[in-house]
């Protein structure tokens, strides 16, 4: 019977023929790996350099950096921040005054001053200041 003939491989100069598929090595590790873009504090999407605004160590899209009250787009020169919430300066002053001088009213948190106030007259008697007054 006839033996199967393999086509001849051609070698020119110092170039060797391509290796067989069985002798392939694993691919070389990538020299470049993409860096994960930071996420916007508001929409939680990736923020790229051309649309990035950084304030108070946090990252926003320029269009997501808005007043928490009137939704006006803010800039680095006209904002005030409390607990990762940003406001335009007029609304910051207004909300601070309406909240009785407490930042808690602006963030939706409970006012810590209310937790410190005695609830009844009996509670005031048990307080350290009341005991000193009774001893005199």
Image (cartoon, rainbow, N blue to C red):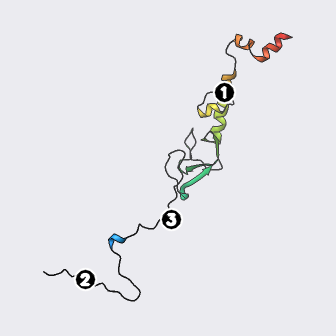
Q: Quadrant of the N terminus?
A: bottom left
Q: Could you tell which of marks 1 and 3 lies nearer the N-terminus?
A: 3
Q: Are marks 3 and 2 in contact (CB under 8 Å)?
A: no
**Residue located at (64% from left, 42% from top):** 81
Residue on which the image places disc 2: 7
Q: Nearer the viewer, residue 17 or 69?
A: 17
Give x and y (percent) for residue 65. 56, 47
Q: Is residue 79 above or below residue 6?
A: above
Residue 88 x %, y %:
62, 42
Up-down relation of residue 132 to residue 10 (above or below): above
- Which image quadrant: the C terminus? top right
Mark 3, residue position:
32
Name the foreground residue: 21 vs 1.
1
Residue wearing tag 1: 112
The local crowd at label 1, few if under 14, some if 14 to 19, many if 20 or more residues have their Cα within 10 Å, is: few
Neighbor class of circle 3 (other Cα within 10 Å; few <14, some 14-19, many 20+) is: few
Labelled pair 1, 3 in contact (Cβ < 8 Å): no
Q: Which of the two labelled residues, at mark 2 and mark 1, occupies the earlier sequence position? A: 2
Is 117 situated above or below 13? above
Q: How many tags in the picture?
A: 3
């Amino acid at each position: 019977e006839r033996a199967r003939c393999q086509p001849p491989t051609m070698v020119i100069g110092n170039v060797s023929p391509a290796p067989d598929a069985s002798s392939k090595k694993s691919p070389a590790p990538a020299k470049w790996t993409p860096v994960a873009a930071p996420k916007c504090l508001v929409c939680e999407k990736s923020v790229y350099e051309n649309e990035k605004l950084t304030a108070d160590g946090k990252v926003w899209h320029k269009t997501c950096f808005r007043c928490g009250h009137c939704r006006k787009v803010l800039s680095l020169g006209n904002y005030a921040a409390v607990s990762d919430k940003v406001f335009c300066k007029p609304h910051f002053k207004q909300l601070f005054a309406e909240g009785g001088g407490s930042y808690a009213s602006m963030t939706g948190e409970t006012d810590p001053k209310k937790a410190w106030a005695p609830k009844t007259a009996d509670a005031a008697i048990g307080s350290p200041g009341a005991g000193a007054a009774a001893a005199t």
